[in-house]
Image (cartoon, rainbow, N blue to C red):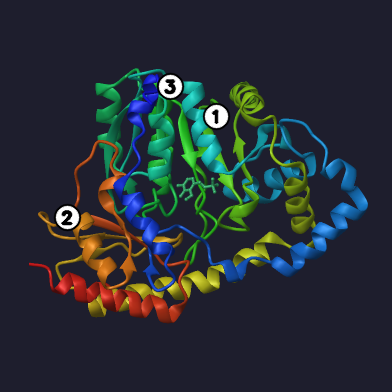
Amino acid sequence: MEFRLAERMNNLKASEIREILKLTENPEIISFAGGLPAPELFPVEKLKEITIQILENDGKAALQYSTTEGYIPLRKIIAEERMKPAGVNVSYENILIINGSQQGLDFSGKIFLDKDDVVICESPSYLGAINAFKAYMPKFVEVPMDDDGMIIEELEKALEANPKAKLIYTIPDFQNPTGKTLSVERRKRLVELAEKYNVPIIEDNPYGELRYEGDRLPAIKSFDTKGLVVYLGTFSKTFCPGYRLGWICASPELLSKYIMVKQGADLQASSISQREAALFMEKYKLDEHINKIKKIYRRRRDLMIETIKKEFPETVKYTYPSGGLFTWISLPEGYDSAEILIKALKEKVAFVPGGSFFPNGGHPNHFRLNYSNMPEEKIVEGIRRLGRVLRNLD
Ligand code: PMP
C-alpha cells in the first residue's frame, strides 16, 4: 500500500543504527549503547509498600482522571526540592507534570516550530531531541563545543546569522552525548544573548543532579528574569524511568501553552504514578536515593576511564565527565564509528556511533559510551574487547 502520509514523515526515517542496536538485547552482548539507569538501584521493595498504601488510602483518586497540570503535592515537591537547589525560586504553579522530559521536547517543537524555522543546538546534541524536533521540519544550526560546553562566541555568530531563530536547545549538565558541562559564566552569557535576540532557551537537564565531584551549578533558568527559559526536568535518571514522570518549569505565560498542548496530547500524566512518586519522596528522601546512585555510577565511571586509559590506543581521546552517564570517544579523522560498531558487535560489545548525534550529518569519527548500566566486571571486559577492536583497525 502507498499511504498518503503527512509531509513531516519524510523527515522521520527508521535509523539503521537503531536496527543494529536491537542486537544488543542479546544478553551475551556487553552494551554501552543505551542511556539506561542501573535497574538494581530501583527501590522496588519500597515502591511495593507505597503502591499498596496508595491503593488502600487513596485508591479512587489514584485511578481516576485528574487535572492536566498534575498532582499538586508532586508539583510542590518539585518546586521546593528539585528547582530551588538549582537556584530557581518558583512555586508549584510554574510546574507542569509531563510524561518524561521527552514529552517536553515534542511539545516544545509543537509550540515553537513551523517548517524551516531554525533550532540552534549544541554540536553534537541529544538524538531524541533531534528526532522530536524533526517532526516539525525545522533547520538545525549546530554550535561547536569545547570542554566548557557550547562556545558562546559561536552561538552569537549563529544568532547573528539567524536572528529569527525560534529556539536555542541545550543540555547544560553532563551533556548527552559528550558528558560536557556549560560553565556558569557561559550560562549567564547565554541568557543575555537569548534576551538580546529574543529567542527562548529549552534547558534540558536530566543529569544535573548526578554530579560526582564539585558543587551543583545553578540552572540556566536561575539567570532568567524575562521568562525566556523553559526548564525540562525528569525523574528518569534519579528515580525510575518506567514511571515516565518529568516536568516543565516555565513562566505562567509559556506554561499555559504547554498545558494546552498537554491536554490535546494525552490530557494528563498518570494519576497513580504521580501519587506513588510523591508519596515515595515524602516518606524517603529522594536526595538519599540519589546519593546511593551517585556512589555506584562514580565507581563505574572511574573504572571505565581507567580501563580506557589502559586499553585504547593513545590516539583515541575521551571526555572525563564529572557526572551523568556518558563519555564521548573521538578517533582521528577518517575513521567511521558505524563500521567499527559492526566489528565491535562481532566481539560482543556495543556503543552508539557518534554520527547520529549531529543533526546535519558528518562527524563519523566519534562514539558514545554509557557507564551506568553495566556492572563493574562487564565494564572492564567490554572496554578490553573494544580496545582490541580499536587496536586492530587499519
Ligand atoms: N533529554 C536528554 C538529554 C536525555 O538524555 C533523555 C533520556 N535519555 C531525555 C531527555 C528523555 O528522558 P525522559 O523522557 O525519560 O525524561
The residue that appears at 68% across and 51% down in the rendered structure is: 81
Q: Amino acid at mark 3?
A: Leu
Q: Are marks 2 and 3 in contact (CB under 8 Å)?
A: no
* Quarter of the image with the C terminus in it: bottom left
124 over 324 or under it: above or below: above
Task: Give the farthest residue toward the right.
Answer: 57
- Secondary element under disc 2, as helix, strand or loop, is loop
> In this rendering, would 164 be left or right of 355?
right
Q: From the viewer's perspective, is residue 199 above or below residue 342?
A: above
Task: Please name the residue that numbered disc 2 is placed on.
Answer: 336
Q: Residues within 10 Å of mark 2 (few under 14, many from 20)?
A: some
Residue 225 marker: 1
Q: CA distance from mark 1 to mark 2?
A: 44 Å
Which secondary structure lies at badge 3? loop
The residue nearer to you, when weighing 241 against 30, is: 30
Image-quadrant location for residue 268: top right
Mark found first going from the N terminus, 2 or 3? 3
Looking at the image, how many numbered discs can be counted on the residues?
A: 3
Residue 135 at x, y percent in the picture: 41, 28
Q: Quadrant of residue 225?
A: top right
In the image as oriented, which residue stretches furthest toward the front?
A: 1
Residue where numbered disc 3 is placed = 113
